[in-house]
Amino acid sequence: MNNESPISLDYLFKPQTVAMLGASERFEYFFIGLKQQNFDHSNLYLINPRKEEVFGMKCYKSVSELPVDTIDHLIIAIGRGRIIQSLKDMLTQKKIRTIHIFTAGLGESDEEGLVIEKELYDIINGDGVKTRFLGPNCMGVYSIPGHLSYEEDLPTEPGNISLVFQSGDLHSQVLRVAHNRFDLNFSKGVSCGNCLDLQISDFLHYYERDKETDIIGVYFEGFSKYHKKEGKILLNTLKTMKKPVLFINGGSTDRSQKAALSHTGSIGTNQNIWKGIVKQTPVINVPTSLDDMVDYLYIFDKIIKRYKDKNEIVIYPKGKNALLVLWSGGFGIIDTNTLTEIGLKVPYFEGEVLEKLMKIHPIVLGSVKNPLDLPWISGTKEYVDLAKVAIAEGNIDVVMIETGTSDDYAQSEFFKRHVDNIIQIKDFTESLNKIFLLILPNYRSKVRERFFDMLSKEGFITFPSVRRAGKAFLALHEYGRKIKRFNNI
């Protein structure tokens, strides 16, 4: 880390001026991304001594020719053999606050790359150098408030999630999948690659103080060999975080650590050390899965927004007791197995609670002992009454209703009453500060898509399976348990 450099990362995420060294038509995706994010092109400067213009924009021969004295953010996209001399020249010609080194083929590559990366590290840490460096070997910055994107077709609406990933493509895929699957939006994101200067801890520190960030997602492969103290710095940073940090440790096996060396040149973390970090901090360890990261971001986003909209402190679930409400006894058995296997509890109703449930609905077909196996009554008043008693008196922390639809069924009055019923149950559950999750299996159907969109507008948290819903809920519960422990509340 360049400790001599006090420059704010605002210049990285909200630059007034952006320049690109090595601009050419092959970076069309970058220009489309900036256009989609409405970046002011009058503040974009292209540098390429071999071209007069790119996509109708003037190209300057060198940084010294730029008509501004200060560049907030410079992107370097040239061959590795030209980086060192170019940097030496540019740093004497203009004030450059942040530099993103897009170029790959350095420490993660071969012997020549290792030599160039060492020279680059020496420049970064040279006397008087206050520029902050991102990368090398990374896609760069995505920022809604800064109108930045390094690729096309990334979300354009503001959200409250920020990311820091060592992998550029994984970063892009999380943005796209989360938005397309759950309509999630983001504030900021960065692909940081080999981390010669700026470290994951730097971005955590920034996001913790960023009013536009409520949730942080991290993908980590390992530490740069040039930053031997970064493990301790990261640990201390994670200890102080007051916002949820959802963290994938990509180098979690010996074999994956070898893959990390060839991807970002990172030195992986011993798993015993990593387990110690997870135990000592409020970080949430996310399995090495894009789906899990997206699911966890989704449930945290929905729950935090619910309380934020009411200007209230978030209440996280204290227990792990689940109520299952569904149509089929077979699915009830499978779902009970699934939830108990991953760590939830499905309390078996008996005694006074069971008596109250039986009084509402003297069972002939199905069961009210949890799961509530309720065929043919999901459009009736008894359906709601049963759920309310079970939730209020069954010591329940999370309610999961499994449902579905079809073209004919969606048009029926019974289905409309069923939807009204699950809205009532959701509202009742949330009035008790408990979690309501709807399970809507994923199948090809336009009516299913319309149903999902309608549920999203009604504020439902909807998962395609009980397993994914249960895992996401457990992450929420674990975070609540951790912040209570670490904040002594």
Image: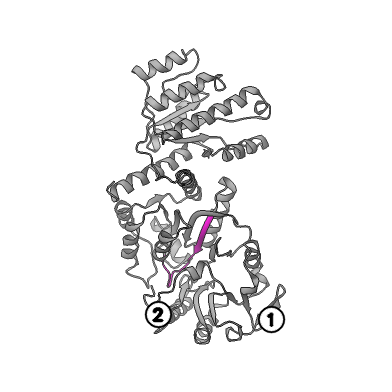
Tell me if residue 482 comes above or below residue 431 in the rendering. Answer: below
* 334 part of magenta stretch: no
Tell me if residue 462 comes above or below residue 146 in the rendering. Answer: above
What colouring style does the render use?
A: one colour
* Residue type beneath disc 1: Lys
Residue 140 drawn at (x, y percent): 53, 67
* Residue type beneath disc 2: Asn
SS of the residue under disc 1: loop
Residues at marks 2 and 1 touching, judged by CB atoms closer than 8 Å: no
* 194 part of magenta stretch: yes
Q: Quadrant of residue 353?
A: top left
Query: Which residue is located at x 59 percent, y 75 percent?
Result: 20
The N terminus - image quarter? bottom left
Residue 4 vs residue 310: left or right? left
Q: Name the N-terminal-most of marks 2 and 1.
A: 1
Question: What's the mark number on residue 125?
Answer: 2
Extreme residue in the right direction: 56
SS of the residue under disc 2: loop
Q: Which span of residues is magenta-colored?
A: 186-199
Assess disc 1: are there few (<14), some (14-19) or many (≥20) residues with their C-alpha within 10 Å of its C-alpha: some
Query: Which residue is located at x 31 percent, y 64 percent?
Result: 232
